[in-house]
Image (cartoon, rainbow, N blue to C red):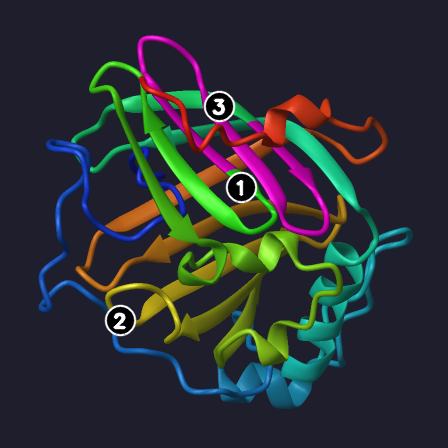
């Protein structure tokens, strides 16, 4: 599993010190072009001789085209209006961060980090606040400037969220790659990893316009319980 990064979870700069390292151009892979869904394949000789694989009983077939992959992920994202669960991040410097995520569509989201991290990220449907209780700061952004705004759309259509760069299947994991040019500071590159067998979003990876990579893994997801509305309140007058 890819290693996640720092509390700059969904937001553009400024970035807290020591919470991630910019990736050099030499290490960044070239952007994939839109194409059919790909997966590991045998050599050409073997491919000609072997019949098409049959999915195991009870296991959903992998999507055969990029359009089918996008539709599979859209169907999942549109299947719930509320979500809560746990997440784990690992910063580029090896620091481990954990917390809880809460989503209520449309527009509301909260990332709540466990101590000793003092960061909170709250979306109230209009704005996103990044609060740091230790530094006594609260920065406000438009929700449209954040690369993970797609998580809180009332109706999700990934094909309209940005430029689709491709999709691939590795085992039971479907990966969909998007570029979002509307984020503050430039283009963000987003990869969503979806578990075809469990029918759940497992991970996202965001490379922001400055080249900082943030990766977040999800578990214990619950789409039935409704989060407390207080989780999504931003106090615009608050003095920290």
Point 61% across, 48% down: residue: 125
Element type at mark 3: strand
Q: Is residue 165 left or right of residue 172?
A: left
216 vs 212: above or below: above
Q: Position of residue 105 (x, y in %)?
A: 72, 48
Question: Could you give the CA–CA distance between mark 1 and mark 2, rounded to whole angstroms?
Answer: 21 Å
Going 24% across and 14% down the picture, which residue do you hit? 134
Comparing 179 with 236, the one in front is: 236
> Is 114 part of what is drawn in magenta?
yes
Q: Secondary structure at mark 2?
A: loop
Q: Which mark is residue 112?
A: 3
Q: Earlier in the sequence, mark 3 or mark 2?
A: 3
Quarter of the figure that contains the C terminus: top left
User: What kind of element bears circle 1?
Assistant: strand
Q: Report, in whole angstroms, how far the alpha carbon at label 3 lies from the one at label 1.
A: 12 Å
The disc at residue 186 is: 2
Picture disc at residue 123: 1
Is residue 171 visible in the rendered structure shown here? no
Q: Is residue 35 left or right of residue 15?
A: right
In the displayed orientation, state which residue is furthest to the front. Answer: 237
Badge number at residue 183: none
Residue 167 in the image: above or below residue 118: below
Q: Give the residue displayed 31% in from the left and 9% down from the top.
A: 116
Looking at the rendering, which quadrant does residue 155 occupy? bottom right
Badge nearest the viewer, 3 or 1: 1
Q: Position of residue 179 (x, y in %)?
A: 41, 74
Q: Which residues are magenta?
A: 101-122
- Dot 1 or dot 2: first in sequence order is 1
| Magenta span: chief secondary structure | strand
Q: Earlier in the sequence, mark 3 or mark 1?
A: 3
Quadrant of residue 49 within the rendered picture: bottom right
């Amino acid at each position: 599993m890819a290693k996640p990064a720092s509390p700059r979870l969904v937001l553009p700069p400024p970035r807290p010190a020591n919470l991630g390292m910019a990736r050099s151009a030499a290490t960044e892979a070239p952007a994939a072009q839109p194409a059919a869904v790909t997966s590991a394949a045998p050599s050409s000789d073997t491919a000609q001789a072997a019949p098409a694989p049959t999915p195991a009983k009870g296991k959903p077939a992998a999507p055969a085209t990029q359009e089918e992959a996008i539709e599979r992920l859209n169907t999942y994202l549109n299947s719930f209006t509320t979500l809560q669960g746990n997440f784990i991040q690992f910063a580029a410097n090896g620091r481990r961060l954990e917390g809880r995520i809460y989503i209520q569509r449309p527009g509301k989201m909260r990332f709540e980090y466990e101590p000793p991290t003092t960061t909170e990220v709250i979306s109230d449907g209009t704005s996103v606040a990044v609060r740091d209780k230790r530094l006594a700061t609260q920065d406000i952004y438009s929700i449209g400037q954040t690369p993970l705004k797609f998580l809180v759309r009332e109706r999700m259509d990934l094909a309209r969220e940005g430029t689709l760069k491709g999709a691939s299947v590795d085992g039971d994991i479907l990966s969909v790659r998007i570029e979002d040019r509307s984020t503050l500071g430039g283009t963000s590159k987003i990869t969503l990893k979806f578990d075809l067998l469990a029918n759940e979003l497992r991970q996202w990876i965001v490379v922001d316009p400055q080249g900082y990579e943030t990766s977040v893994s999800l578990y214990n997801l619950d789409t039935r319980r409704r989060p407390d509305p207080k989780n999504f309140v931003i106090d615009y007058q608050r003095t920290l």
